[in-house]
Image (cartoon, rainbow, N blue to C red):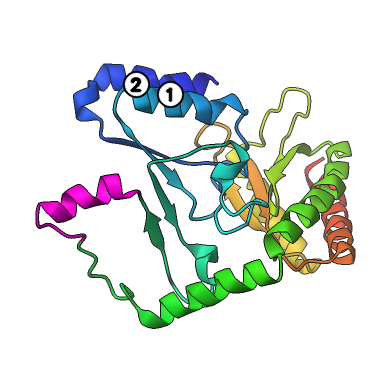
């Protein structure tokens, strides 16, 4: 919760008249390894923004469209942001498409002043992209894949929590099928491996050789040190495939322990 209160301190330091908006990932993406804030975090952020007349923008590019087991990660916290930005899963990766959702109370004043939103990039307002987005949303709803993501995410996380028995695994976290595994040198102190060891680079290379594709990231501990991988399989993953992920993870960890001690 300390991070939430840092926002209020920052606004006071800068002056509320100089702060127009606060933007954040509702659940951490790859930079923090699917970190899930405590239940009161976004409630506190919402209160601080309202108090200081600061817009709250939810970055749902990675977490939205069902990835965390609900249509938006906001729904886990009862959060109603002023603006939501989405992408990635909006077309299931078949076409580059992003979107912004905002209430009329924010958009109408711009139109009434004769202004408009200028979007002039390569894929802007592309009908094929919009068609792909609509098809994706309809398919997700028709096949009830968001509920399936929540169900399979719980199963996979439960399986991956067995990795906590290994001395190199400091944490397993996330929601739905957006999961993160953090590696540590000292399990009790949660001390990360020194960056020069390049632990996660060696891990993902070994995992790939074992048939497991993972998304690595570094620096979450202090900006330089820290190793983690993201585990974000498709919504249609089966229980046997979840078990296979665990087995390949365990095989890779055994090899890493022989190498790093």
Q: Can you give x and y, in whole percent of width and height, for residue 28 in the image?
A: 56, 42
54 relative to 111, above or below: above
Q: Quadrant of residue 218?
A: top right
Callout 1 secondary element: helix
**Residue 43 can be seen, yes or no:** yes
Q: Would you name the residue on which mark 1 appears? A: 47
Q: Can you give x and y, in whole percent of width and height, for residue 9 in the image?
A: 36, 17
Q: Can you give x and y, in whole percent of width and height, for residue 26 in the image?
A: 53, 41
Q: Nearer the viewer, residue 188 or 174?
A: 174
Q: Can you give x and y, in whole percent of width and height, for residue 116 in the image?
A: 17, 60
Q: Nearer the viewer, residue 142 or 249?
A: 142
Q: Would you name the residue on which mark 2 appears? A: 51
Magenta residues (range) = 103-117
Q: Residue at 59%, 54% (x, y): give it.
A: 71
Is 187 included in the stretch rendered in magenta? no
Asked whether, in this view, residue 239 is left or right of residue 209, the answer is: right
């Amino acid at each position: 919760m300390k991070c939430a209160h840092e926002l209020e301190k920052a606004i006071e330091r800068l002056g509320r008249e100089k702060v127009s908006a606060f933007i954040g990932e509702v659940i951490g993406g790859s930079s923090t390894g699917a970190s899930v804030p405590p239940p009161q975090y976004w409630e506190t952020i919402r209160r601080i923004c309202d108090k200081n007349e600061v817009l709250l923008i939810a970055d749902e590019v990675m977490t939205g469209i069902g990835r965390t087991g609900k249509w938006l990660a906001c729904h886990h916290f009862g959060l109603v942001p002023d603006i939501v930005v989405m992408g990635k899963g909006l077309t299931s990766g078949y076409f580059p498409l992003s979107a912004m959702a905002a209430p009329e109370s924010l958009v109408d004043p711009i139109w009434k002043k004769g202004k408009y939103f200028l979007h002039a990039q390569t894929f802007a307002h592309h009908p094929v992209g919009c068609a792909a987005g609509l098809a994706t949303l309809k398919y997700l709803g028709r096949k009830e894949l968001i509920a399936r993501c929540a169900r399979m995410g719980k199963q996979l996380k439960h399986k991956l929590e067995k990795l906590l028995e290994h001395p190199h695994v400091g944490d397993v976290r996330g929601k739905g099928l957006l999961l993160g595994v953090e590696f540590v040198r000292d399990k009790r102190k949660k001390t990360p491996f020194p960056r020069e060891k390049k632990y996660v680079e060696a891990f993902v290379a070994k995992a790939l050789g074992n048939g497991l594709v993972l998304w690595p990231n570094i620096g979450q501990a202090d900006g330089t040190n820290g190793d983690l991988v993201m585990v974000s399989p498709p919504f249609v993953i089966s229980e046997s495939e979840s078990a296979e992920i665990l087995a390949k993870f365990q095989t890779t960890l055994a090899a890493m322990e022989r190498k790093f001690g």
